[in-house]
Image: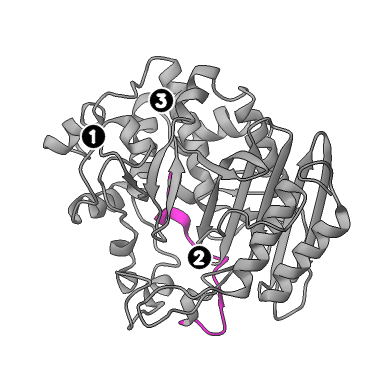
Amino acid sequence: MSPATGLDHAELQSALDGVHRAGVPGVYAEVREAGRTWRGASGVADVETGRPVRADMRHRVGSITKTFTAAAVMQQVERGRIRLDAPIGGYLPHLVPGERGRRITVRMLLNHTSGLPDYIPYAFPSLQGFPSLPDMSPKSLDDNRFREFRPAELIELGLAAPPAGEPGGPTGVYSNTNYLLLGQLLERVTGTTAEKYITQNVIERAGLRHTGFPTGTRVKGPHSRMYEGFYGVVDPPRDYSVYNMSWTGTGAALVSTMEDLNRFYARLLDGGIVNRSSLAQMRRTIPVRALDGSTIEYGLGLHRVDIPGCGTFWGHDGTVWGAGTMSLTRADGRRQMSVAVNLQRWHTLDSSGKPRRHPVDDALSTLYRRAMCGDGDTPGPPSPR
């Protein structure tokens, strides 16, 4: 089959099964091509009971939340309440005071060129320096399972840490601190919580029926358990599906389904959530260093992924403890893929602290290529980490 000319159900299911055989307990996906839809699942949602995973399950989709937050900010830009190149200190002087507040703009938060470091290693102290420390421990993961963080508390941790770079530099550094600040900005200009605004103006506008911010520690509705391996430190991997997601908020807290994610990105990229001018701004990319050390092409809440012989795709990936997701839509809108896995950080580390290549990586690459391009001969985008 030539790339992106149809949905070969048997090949797609075989690729899903390959991810399960490589070591992921459960994997599920929805692929769309020119009005046709395929959904599939392989493996189990619970390793103890053997309950099967299903394609319609809800999932913690991690940093895919950032696209929703960015779209909400762009709506306020369209209304004139936010200016992309205005300093964040003018909106939130109590959170980003002084010179930083004057130098860092809203755009820099959206595309990760603010120079603000990620707060996560400081909110989870036993993870500082991961994955390079030889004495890594999951203690912080367990200690924070039911902890209620305040956004200002996490932002303060990020601002107090050594800078990741100079504001407005040519290369960005991915940081969740940026998107917590954008959530506070939305609250400042709309007079309501960012979660409520995003729900009413992005989620509902896109017609999503199974997407929302969690209100407790549990995922509501049918879902899988979510297993965290933490680079071999947690062996066997432990279920972290029950978790207080206040540690990530408007950066990565959303719960969704693969069907809803495809619907969202189709609507967004077709101009149904923000206008064409805003969408053009969101697609202006720069190189950004991701949390795993790789370099990605990042716009305003959107990744660009170029696959030779297949096309340019837009979307985002996401990971939280135990759950990973990838959602990509081809630039012409005719091909879409959303994939969820219920295991994260399945790698072990080499002597330098770098994750070793694992059969799961190769199996996911094959799945992504078949889902987006109709073949599995050329590597697809990297798996979310």
Please tell me which residue lies in front, 117 or 359: 359
Asked if residue 240 is among those painted magenta in the image, a careful observer would answer yes
Spot occupied by residue 120 in the image (x, y as percentages of width and height): 34, 59
Between disc 1 and disc 2, whose residue precedes?
A: 1
At a point 34% along the width and 43% down the height, the residue shown is 178
Please tell me which residue lies in front, 279 or 81: 279
173 over 91 or under it: above or below: below
Q: Is residue 216 visible?
A: no
Q: CA distance from mark 1 to mark 3?
A: 21 Å
Per the image, label 3 sits on a secondary structure element best described as helix
Look at mark 2 in the image and give the residue it sits on.
Answer: 321
Range covered by the magenta-colored residues: 233-250
Spot occupied by residue 205 in the image (x, y as percentages of width and height): 63, 27
**What is the number of the mark on residue 190?**
3
Spot occupied by residue 294 in the image (x, y as percentages of width and height): 42, 57
Q: CA distance from mark 3 to mark 2?
A: 31 Å
Q: Which amino acid type is marked by label 3? A: Thr
Look at mark 1 in the image and give the residue it sits on.
Answer: 104
Per the image, label 2 sits on a secondary structure element best described as loop
Q: Which amino acid type is marked by label 2? A: Trp
